[in-house]
Amino acid sequence: MKAVLSAAAAALLLSLAACSQASVPETAETPPPYSQAEIDGSLAPSPATVAMRWEWLNPAINAFTFRNTHQVFAYRNVAAPETPRDLPRGDALAMPAAALQGQQVDYATWADATFTNAFLVLKDGKVVFEDYRNRMRADTPHIGFSMTKTITAMLVGQALERGEIASLDDPVSKYVPALAAGAYGAATIRNVLEMRSGADIEERYDFGENPSLAAQIHEAAIVRNERRFADFAVGIGQRSEPGARFNYATLDTAVLGWVLEEATGAKLEDLMESRIWQPLGAEYAGHFLADGPVGEGRALNGMGFNASLRDWARLGQLMLDNGLAGAVRVLPEGWVAQMTAMKPTGQQMPGYGLQTWQVDSEPGAFAAVGLAGQFIYVHPASRTVIVKLSYHPPVEPEWLVPAELAYFAAIANLR
């Protein structure tokens, strides 16, 4: 009898709880709840999960791991709209021969040799070539690594237009007071966007007994989720005056993400969803990797966004069209021009704008670039967008990236 009464009481309590929840309607300002998968994925990683995370760059398996990050890492979903914006098909492009270590080869040979998971070409906004390899599919999310930085610059431009950020020449500490001490205390948002913060960090991943700072951040924030990535910026030393020297550092972009969250009062994944992914008309959901559990960790906006091949292409087309997705203005007018106003880097890739690269000498061409061969290459003169999703080995052959960039230019310049 007690068991029957207990069951009835439990059912009554559940019913009352459901009524209580139903009586509080979700408003437009209320972000959607995290999915159970996101919550489960954010649990403290077990030793086995930590071991898997260490292997994601392993060249024996990275063709697989780069498209399955949500199965291994903490992540935050970015929902696609119910109706995607059309990405029409044009006349099929006959792919040119490629130069590869002194030989002329066909596309298939070039694609295998350059560790290609997927490749797409848009001409005048139309898909003219699309190729999936190594069990990639149209709906497969693939990590973009530092192509995510270019997305961060898009979000900064939107916040600037909305008045949430007053000026690019504001110090970052205006929005994140915790950064007042250390190198970032003197750096402006513009300095950080240009990778000229002056912070004392090298993008060098030396692990082992004496790990570099970048390696320490990687382990603590990405692998173990024990600390927030951007928190390593607090009190960091200074190596040069802000604005004086180009120094590529993912920590700079993590600082921009922290600024965005404080300036807007919204999570990065929610900003991405409402301000870019939905108005862009993305075809499939994307996701950010995260540096900790839901409600605590932040989206890894410097290296962690994942999307399908076509949706990466939509982002490239958005930039080619100066911030328009069809008739919808997604980015402020003139913002792409600011993102792509390049300054010399003194490196193999000759110019850098606002979280966006100049990768070759093609007039006006620019790119989002990510670790291990991720590219969105935009060639305005020919109205071409090229996306390459790759699985480069951690130590890249010297010929590899030049061969990729040369082929992009050859495709763009086809007549």
Image (spheres, rainbow, N blue to C red):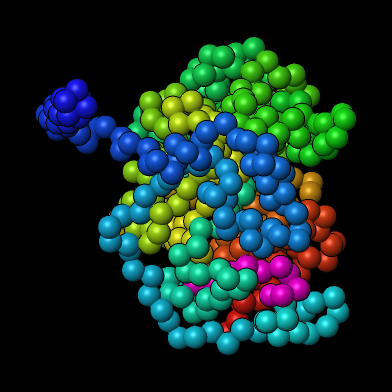
The residue at 64%/56% (across/down) is: 65
Residue shown at the point (75%, 84%) measured from the top left: 105
Q: Is residue 266 above or below residue 374?
A: above
Q: Is residue 23 magenta?
A: no
Specify whether residue 299 is in view.
no
The stretch of residues the image draws in magenta is 111-122
Q: Please tell me which residue is depicted at 44% across the width and 23% down the height of the picture.
A: 262
Q: Nearer the viewer, residue 40 or 233?
A: 40
Quarter assignment of residue 60: bottom right
Position of the N terminus by quadrant: top left
Side (left or right) of 283 relative to 2: right
Asked whether 182 or 111 is in front, the reply is 111
Pinpoint residue 342: horizontal percent, then vertical percent: 63, 48
- The picture places residue 221, in percent across and down from the top left corner, at 63, 31
Q: Viewed as shown, does residue 230 lie left or right of 55? A: left
Viewer-side residue, 31 vs 278: 31
Residue 111 image position (x, y, % from top left): 69, 75
> Residue at 56% of width from left, 73% of height from top?
132
Percent across and percent down for residue 328 are 30, 55
Side of 207 relative to 56 (left or right) = right
Q: Note whether residue 309 is visible.
A: yes
Q: Residue 14: which quarter of the image?
A: top left
